[in-house]
């Protein structure tokens, strides 16, 4: 894409003019303020997090935690949780991948990633909305409005956050009602591609002991990927969210109820095939399926560029979620507090996604996902002398139905492709599930000596997973063979597409996870810690196996044992301030859950298996430097080195130990600088921020093959010019330019180059200019 020189030039001219105009103003202000205290540059606002399930200053938490506050979320245009990876070391978010679509983002953290979306397996990064864990990610692309902060805890946190947090946890912390007074916010963002985003919130005290907080947000845009067959953009956005919360307080009891609703009804991902295999099925079956030659398809797509496709698939996302949570706290006495957290969530999702990114029906999938979860967590925590402690229990149950139908290597009939995949002969993978988890946990920190403390924590979890598997070829045959006579020595048979096409399976899994940490705080500005933590991801079932024996055989839980050394330090350097947070980690990863193609059948879908073991090690550094009052530099660097120690393919017997870890860029980074240009009561406060971020290349999925499955490296420059309380009006205005150099980042869509013959990607957004207007009261 060619740069819009006029528009970009206007932004640069405006920025240069403001900087030049601000210099004498700043000099006058400095002169007028001579002799005042220089403390502003030497201090840092205290950031509180809930990484230990209680509010605590970030610099006092012996964990690697990134906390992105509301102001930073707004400035950096972090509209959804999918954008948070660019602000966090060793984290990556992927949307629009392998049947998940943009409505179900997936996370990779310290080499731990999830590639299965269904209810027969779990994530490796736990996501919390408030105090409640979210089992399925559908709907997590909703707008991040009225959010106090987003916290990312890196490394296994299986003691306080439970199972499925081997990589860490992401916590979305909405603002809660307050009785301090009426307050609120209204904001709107206007940008290219028809982008109009808005949100509004109001907090109203009902009395000294009750308050109500209401808010809503919407996000719309026209998209930026044009489909020539459909003659329209295919990745448009249309979502809205509503949230209400009620605070009730009586004496030592406080109760908060929150209801959150999300609705999405918009376009799909809009990917294209970056590579096509001249020896794959797309070429071998070209004559019988009316496919055009591979070289022609590749040449035409290259000529179109990244942001134009010719797929002809009317992709869509239709998603609705509702969350209800109730938190009750009761101060038993001055040193003991009781807390009960109830959560309920319902997901209704219907999507259509083109996974091959060509004009032919190589792999089109339509998916209905319906699920409902209920949970309750009991906590008792307090302090006793030199001991801070927490103990509790947890219950979780989830039921649902994953129903996906795919047309695989279908016949090309020309024109617009079908809008439904539930047709005769289609591959229908359907699983109903009922998952239950129960856990007890306790953790305490005891001060051994002045500044030296020991943390010990443990959690025991019992899981049960029940499945009804109904895979079939619609009105054709069963999707798997069954053992009809109960004799494993005789061949299994296909029962046809009828009542006998079902497998009932169940499995139980249990595990003990722990946290042992030695923490040393020699002064208020320094924290040194060494920890040993164990986390686990629960086992499950390979929902797409081609035989009953494979469907009934569960894959085992995976475990991560992590050793970590950390330093958090605030440095006061004369009139300057420096904050350095560094973590070094080494993880042993056993019974690794990975996707593999079942080569014993003609089914091109993957199943989950347990690889033997792996080692993951890395470094994370986050830095904030304020040399003078009006200038702040910040950044991070994340490095991950992940490799298999032993990995034998159970289907072929091949040694896959040299295979790359999927979705693990070796490096990611960000460098940002903010200059306060103007501080003037009549004009307002004006600041300029530039941020440069990037990551290395990575393998897109477990069963991909390099170089076709490698997602290229990417780096991006973003610029922001912000005015607070402009002309004393109370309005904040931000001008922004995202992806200034107009470099397109790819995300994985699907990669089956060696079989079906394609590796497809989703292009990210091009350069975008916009304006954000906000009024807080």
Image (spheres, helix red, strand yellow):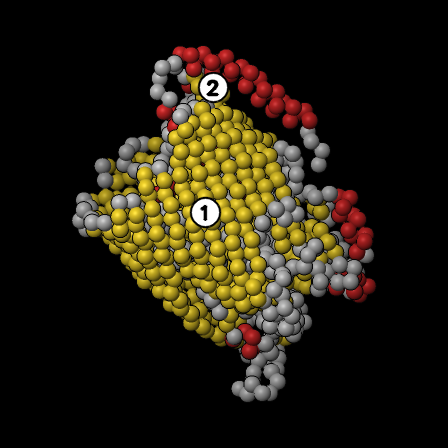
- The image position of residue 150, as x and y in percent, is 43, 43
Residue 478: which disc? none
Say whether residue 228 is left or right of residue 393.
right
Query: In the rendered image, which quarter is residue 754 located in?
Result: bottom right
Question: In front: 329, or 556?
Answer: 556
Query: In the rendered image, which quarter is residue 205 located in?
Result: top left
Question: In front: 375, or 600?
Answer: 600
- The image position of residue 284, as x and y in percent, is 79, 65
In percent of the image, x 71 and y 52: which residue is there?
273
In percent of the image, x 59 and y 41: which residue is there?
694
* Residue 388 visible in image: no
644 up-or-down from 745: above or below: below
In percent of the image, x 57 and y 17: which residue is there?
17
* Residue 10 visible in image: yes
In this rendering, the count of numbered labels is 2
Query: In the rendered image, which quarter is residue 203 located in?
Result: top left
Q: How far apart are marks 2 and 1 (CA)?
A: 36 Å
In percent of the image, x 60 and y 78: which residue is there?
481
- The image position of residue 49, as x and y in percent, is 37, 43
Classed neighbour count for the residue bearing mark 2: other residues with Cα under 10 Å, few (<14), some (14–19), many (≥20) = many
Residue 583: which disc? 1
Sooner in the amino-acid sequence: mark 2 or mark 1: 1
**2 and 1 marks in contact (CB < 8 Å):** no
695 up-or-down from 604: above or below: above
Say whether residue 342 is left or right of residue 650.
left
* Circle 1: element type: strand
Residue 678: which disc? 2
- The image position of residue 660, as x and y in percent, is 61, 58
* Circle 2: element type: strand
């Amino acid at each position: 894409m060619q740069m819009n020189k006029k528009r970009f030039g206007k932004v640069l001219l405006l920025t240069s003019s403001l900087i030049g105009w601000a210099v004498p103003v700043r000099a006058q202000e400095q002169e007028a303020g001579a002799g005042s205290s220089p403390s502003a540059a030497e201090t840092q606002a205290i950031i509180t997090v809930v990484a230990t399930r209680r509010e605590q200053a970030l610099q006092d938490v012996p964990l690697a935690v990134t906390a992105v506050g509301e102001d930073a979320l707004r400035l950096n245009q972090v509209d959804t949780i999918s954008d948070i990876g660019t602000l966090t070391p060793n984290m990556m978010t992927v949307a629009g991948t392998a049947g998940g679509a943009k409505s179900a983002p997936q996370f990779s953290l310290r080499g731990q990633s999830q590639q299965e979306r269904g209810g027969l397996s779990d994530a490796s990064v736990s996501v919390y909305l408030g105090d409640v864990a979210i089992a399925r990610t559908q709907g997590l692309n909703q707008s991040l409005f009225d959010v106090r902060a987003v916290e990312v805890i890196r490394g296994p946190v299986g003691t306080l956050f439970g199972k499925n947090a081997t990589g860490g946890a992401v916590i979305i912390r909405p603002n809660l009602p307050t009785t301090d007074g009426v307050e609120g916010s209204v904001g709107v963002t206007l940008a290219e591609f028809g982008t109009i985003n808005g949100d509004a919130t109001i907090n109203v005290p009902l009395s000294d002991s009750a308050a109500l907080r209401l808010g809503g947000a919407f996000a719309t845009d026209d998209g930026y990927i044009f489909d020539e067959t459909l003659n329209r953009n295919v990745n448009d956005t249309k979502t809205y969210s509503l949230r209400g919360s009620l605070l009730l307080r009586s004496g030592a009891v406080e109760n908060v109820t929150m209801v959150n609703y999300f609705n999405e009804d918009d376009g799909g991902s809009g990917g294209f095939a970056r590579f096509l295999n001249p020896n794959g099925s797309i070429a071998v079956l070209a004559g019988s399926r009316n496919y055009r030659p591979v070289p022609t398809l590749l040449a035409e797509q290259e000529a179109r560029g990244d942001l134009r496709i010719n797929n002809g698939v009317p992709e869509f996302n239709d998603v609705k979620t509702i969350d209800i949570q109730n938190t009750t706290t009761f101060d038993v006495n001055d040193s003991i507090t009781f807390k009960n957290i109830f959560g309920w969530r319902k997901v209704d999702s219907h999507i259509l996604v083109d996974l091959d990114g060509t004009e032919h029906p190589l792999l089109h999938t339509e998916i209905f996902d319906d699920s409902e979860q209920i949970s309750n967590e009991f906590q008792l925590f307090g302090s006793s002398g030199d001991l801070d402690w927490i103990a509790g229990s947890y219950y979780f149950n989830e039921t649902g139905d994953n129903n996906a139908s795919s047309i695989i290597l279908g016949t090309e009939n020309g024109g617009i492709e079908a809008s439904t995949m539930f047709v005769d002969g289609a591959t229908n993978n359907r699983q109903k599930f009922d998952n239950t988890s129960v856990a007890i946990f306790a953790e305490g920190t005891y001060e051994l000596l002045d500044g030296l403390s020991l943390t010990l924590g443990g959690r025991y979890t019992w899981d049960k997973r029940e499945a009804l598997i109904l895979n079939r070829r619609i009105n054709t045959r069963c999707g798997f063979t069954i053992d009809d006579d109960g004799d494993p020595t005789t061949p299994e048979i296909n029962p046809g597409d009828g009542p006998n096409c079902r497998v009932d399976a169940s499995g139980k899994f249990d595990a003990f996870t722990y946290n042992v940490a030695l923490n040393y705080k020699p002064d208020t500005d320094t924290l040194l810690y060494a920890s040993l933590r164990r986390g686990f991801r629960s086992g499950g079932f390979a929902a797409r196996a081609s035989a009953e024996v494979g469907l009934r055989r569960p894959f085992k839980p995976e475990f991560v044992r992590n050793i970590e050394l950390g330093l958090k330090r605030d440095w006061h350097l004369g009139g300057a301030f420096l904050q350095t947070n560094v973590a070094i980690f080494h993880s042993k990863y056993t019974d690794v859950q990975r996707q593999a193609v079942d080569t014993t059948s003609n089914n091109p879908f993957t199943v989950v298996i347990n690889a033997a073991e792996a080692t993951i090690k890395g470094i994370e550094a986050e830095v904030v430097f304020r040399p003078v009052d009006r200038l702040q530099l910040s950044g991070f660097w994340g490095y991950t080195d992940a490799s298999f120690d032993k990995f034998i393919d159970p289907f072929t017997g091949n040694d896959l130990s040299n295979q790359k870890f999927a979705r693990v860029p070796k490096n990611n980074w960000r460098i940002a600088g903010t200059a306060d240009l103007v501080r003037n009561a009549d004009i307002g406060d004006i600041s300029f921020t530039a941020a440069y971020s990037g990551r290395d290349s990575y393998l897109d999925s477990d069963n991909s093959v390099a170089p076709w499955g490698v997602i290229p490296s990417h780096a991006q420059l973003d610029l922001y010019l912000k005015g607070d309380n402009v002309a004393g009006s109370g309005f904040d205005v931000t001008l922004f330019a995202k992806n200034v150099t107009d470099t397109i980042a790819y995300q994985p869509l699907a990669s089956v180059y060696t079989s079906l013959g394609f590796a497809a990607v989703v292009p990210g957004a091009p350069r975008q200019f916009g304006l954000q207007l906000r009024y807080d009261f």
